[in-house]
Structure formats: structure tokens, C-alpha cells
Image (cartoon, rainbow, N blue to C red):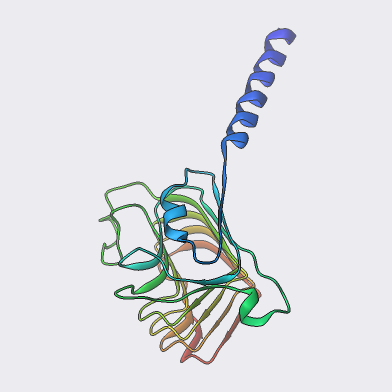
Amino acid sequence: MKKRFFGSLLAVAAFTAASVSQAAVHRVMPGGDIQAAIDGALPGDTILVEPGEYTTSNPDFGLHITTDNLRLIGKVKRGQGEDGKVIIRPSGTQITGVYAAPDGCGPKVGVGECPFPDLKGFYIRGFTVLGFPDNGIQTRFVDGFKIIRNEVGNVDLNGIYPTISANGLVQNNVAYGTKDTAMWVAASENVRVIGNDLSGSPIGLE
């Protein structure tokens, strides 16, 4: 009995170690394409982005995330001002800075209309999203998300905008200069909102 129990534990441990070891880190340098790294990543991978100003190849969003358990981390270098930030700006027809949702479930897909299961485990930290004509960072149909230490400024609608999502953490972000709401947690449940700095918008937190 004991041998069989310990054998099962070893098998689980080995499987867990193998799963962790398979996760990759995709590094993006200034001038690189963050969206290309996202598109080439597998669930559990990390996209690590060096400071710089980026535009991407996606026609609709600055960054579009449809892969489960993807981690986007901007390497912020404190004390260097704009030069130490990972900055995303619009180019062409892009409307929202960062959009995380299941594939095929765009901003116009209503509640109950997304044909795919919720996106699982989205994480973003250290990004500065500026000047988009719609929203800054938005989730839809996401279960388990963390939006931490990002900056969103001067977008035409909502800065940080978790929608139709659940089990999230929105912490220590800065949002300002929006024409609607700096931070709007809409139609979502079990979302913790902690220590954010919201200013210069008609509504701070909704």
C-alpha cells in the first residue's frame, strides 16, 4: 500500500516538473514584434519585453491574447523615465491597446455568445499603454487574471477595463486622461481592486 502511494506521488511530481520545464520565456527586444511572440507562445509561457516603444502587426489591437495562462511582463527600469518603460502606442486601425479574450470573441460579442470556453489565467505587468482610440487594457470572458503595475493614459474610452470576467486582481496600476472611466470593472465577479492611482478622467473607478 505504502509503495503504491509513494509511487503515485513520484509520478505526480515528475509530471508537474515536466510541465514546468516545458514553459518557455520569449524575449522581445526594442524593435521586435510583441504580437509575434504572443502568437508563437504556448500555454504557460512568458513574454518578457525589454524597455522601448513598440507597435505591433495586429490590425485590430495593440496586443491580442487568446492563449491560456500567458504571462506578459514588461521589464521596467526605474529612474529612467520614458526610456525605462515598455510603451505600446496605436498604429493604423488598432482600437484597443491590450485585448485578452478567447479566440473569435471580439469586443462586439455579447454575453452568452462566445462559442469557446473562457480564457484561463491571463497576467500582465509593467506595460505602458498610451493613446488608443478605444480602451487601454481589456479582458472579456477571462477566468483568472492579474493586471498589475501597468500604466494607461490618454485613451478615448476606458483605461483598465475587465469585462465579463472572473477571479481577478487589479493592483497598483496607474490610469489617467481617459474620456470615460479610468478603471471600469464591468459585468464581472470576484475581482479584487487594490492600490490603483486613477486621475484626470470623468470617472475614476466604476
Q: Residue at x 38, y 72 (%)?
A: 96
In the rendered view, would you say 72 is above or below 60? above
- Look at the image and tell me whether residue 164 can be seen: yes
Q: For residue 198, what is the image quadrant?
A: bottom right
Q: Position of residue 57 (x, y in %)?
A: 36, 63
What percent of the width, then of the height, locates residue 27? Answer: 57, 54
- Given residues 151 and 35, the one toward you in this image is 35
On screen, residue 130 versus residue 76, left or right, reads left
x and y, in percent, of residue 73 in the image: 59, 60
Asked where in the image residue 188 lies, by quadrant, the reply is bottom left
Left/right of residue 96 with respect to residue 1 in the rendered view: left
Q: Residue furthest front?
A: 31
Which quarter shows the N terminus? top right
**Residue at the image position 31 percent from the left and 47 percent from the top:** 116
Residue name at image x 54 percent, y 63 percent: 191
Report which quarter residue 194 is drawn in. Answer: bottom right
Is 120 located above or below residue 178 in the figure? Answer: above
Q: Give the percent coordinates (x, y) of residue 28.
A: 54, 58
Residue occupying image coordinates x 41% and y 86%: 180
The foreground one among 57 and 38 is: 57
158 w.r.t. 56: above or below: below
Q: How many marks?
A: 0
Res. 196 visible in picture = no
